[in-house]
Image: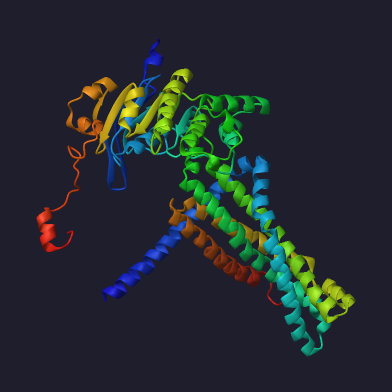
Amino acid sequence: MNGVSETPLVELKDVRFAYGEREILKGVNLVVPRGKVVAIMGGSGCGKTTLLRLIGGQLRAVSGTVTVAGEDMGRIGRDRMYELRRRMGMLFQFGALFTDMSVFENVAFPLREHTDLPPELIESLVLMKLNAVGLRGAAHLEPSELSGGMARRVALARAIALDPMLIMYDEPFAGLDPISLGIIGQLIRRLNDALGASSVMVTHDVHESLEIVDYVYFVSDGRIVAEGTPDEIRASRDPFVHQFVHAEADGPVPFHMAAPPIGDSILNGRAA
Amino acid sequence: MNVWLSAFRRVGNMVTEGVWRLGFATRFLGLILLYSGQSLRRVHLTIREIYFSGVLSLLIIVVSGLFVGLVLGLQGYETLQRFGSGDALGVLVALSLTRELGPVVAGLLFASRAGSAVTAEVGLMKTTEQLKAMDMMAVNPIARVAAPRFWGGVIAMPLLAAIFTAMGIFGGWLIGVVVIGVDAGAFWSQMQAAVDFRYDILNGVIKSVVFGVAVSLIAVFEGYDCHPTAEGISRAITRTVVSSALAILALDFVLTSFMFRGTS
């Protein structure tokens, strides 16, 4: 391997982000090495999806740098950003398929928008991509005719239509039945390796993720609180990781939202 | 005192909010125009929107135009014959429709039929992250979604107003000539003599283009700007219909006062 390929594809250095006064990320350092599948885990609302949007350039960090393929996402203009995005694929939580197009047209969309390929070649490519996710037979269906798991697989076929260097997944396992969950998990791993891409996925599905990823970051309260390979995570004695991996209701993340003592609330007869 | 103060604050808030939104909408129009070149080069995108906004609105436009013409024929004849000018019915029907009723009523119907549909569609695309997905695929949603819908509306609106006017004149003829028995020669020849192409018809067309721009901009902007929830979409659709109606009526007054000053 030469020096260039060893530099990570995505690198976040001391990234801070806030929506107005509300601070979401408080100095995050994170690396996605080339060819690897990296998971970002954490509870709901901890800033995971914000991280993904920063990597995709949909948001800009307040301070710190987000580097993708050597480009500082906070400094490049729209045209350069779009050039980079052509080499990225993103799977949205519920697929975000275009509802006015068939499955075939959805997967063909990036090809038609960004290439001048003849129709026969586009058709072959679309069918190959759909075949890769096992849904070549669904090409003629409308998005409304698909189950949640199928919609996500079609969206995955669309995300890899232009053979991206980076694939981003926003909660790829949310709301899926166990079979679909396994299929998506396997697809994420297999497509990453087959395309020679790198993947970053935001999820709170611990067990499915630990089966397929190379490295895990845990985010809590806007900071990386733990990181490691799946084996290290499973063996971790860190209280937060232990609570998360074993789905314990109470721990460093408390079961109760901060409130005055229950005796006071009950005796006073109100929630204040 | 506090009640007055909070009412005063609310008014102030509404005004600043309105100015903000007007600013955003103007900026949005600027972006649409900026990216229109990209989208108009792929003409099939705009033709598709002309179909959805224009062709699918034809039924309501044709039927409404016909009934407006029928009523205009009845009421117009009823009034004109008191002064012994029943033959001038053609003039009355044609001038009312080309100058005012055609553009205004067609605009109001267009806003409720096509404008609301555009807002709902764009709003739903936003809510289901389709616009974000497009942006992540390096496809500019303003060029791909907003601009074709805007131009589709701008092109469809004058055509619909023209069809509305034609149907109205047909309705007036049906009632006046066929049912009541006004002389057909007088009906058409007086109309032909009194209606001026530039002064009446062209001004009417200008009005319908202006209404088309206003309604299409409001419809696309409200969809694009809506709060991404079911309630947000419903509010956006309501705002589209209400704002479009107010905009059409206000613009109509301004345009009429510039175009027709009682000089002829």
User: Does residue A68 appear in the picture of this structure?
Assistant: no
Q: Position of residue A76 (x, y in %)?
A: 44, 32
Image quarter in which the C terminus of chain B is found: bottom right
User: Does residue B21 appear in the picture of this structure?
Assistant: yes
Which one is in front, B73 or A157? Answer: A157
**Does residue B70 appear to the left or right of A46 in the view shown?**
right
**Does residue A94 appear to the left or right of B139 in the view shown?**
left
Residue name at image x 55 percent, y 56 percent: B219
Residue name at image x 64 percent, y 72 percent: B257
Q: Position of residue B21 (x, y in %)?
A: 46, 57
Residue A272 vertical placement versus A201 (above, below): below
Residue B263 vertical placement versus B148 (above, below): below
Q: Position of residue A155 (x, y in %)?
A: 50, 34
Residue name at image x 67 percent, y 55 percent: B56
Q: Position of residue B224 (x, y in %)?
A: 50, 50
Image quarter in which the N terminus of chain B is found: bottom left
Residue that extends furthest to the top in the rendered view of this protein: A1
Residue B220 vertical placement versus A212 (above, below): below
**Does residue A29 appear to the left or right of B178 in the view shown?**
left
Q: How many marks?
A: 0
Residue A217 position by quadrant: top left
Residue B59 position by quadrant: bottom right
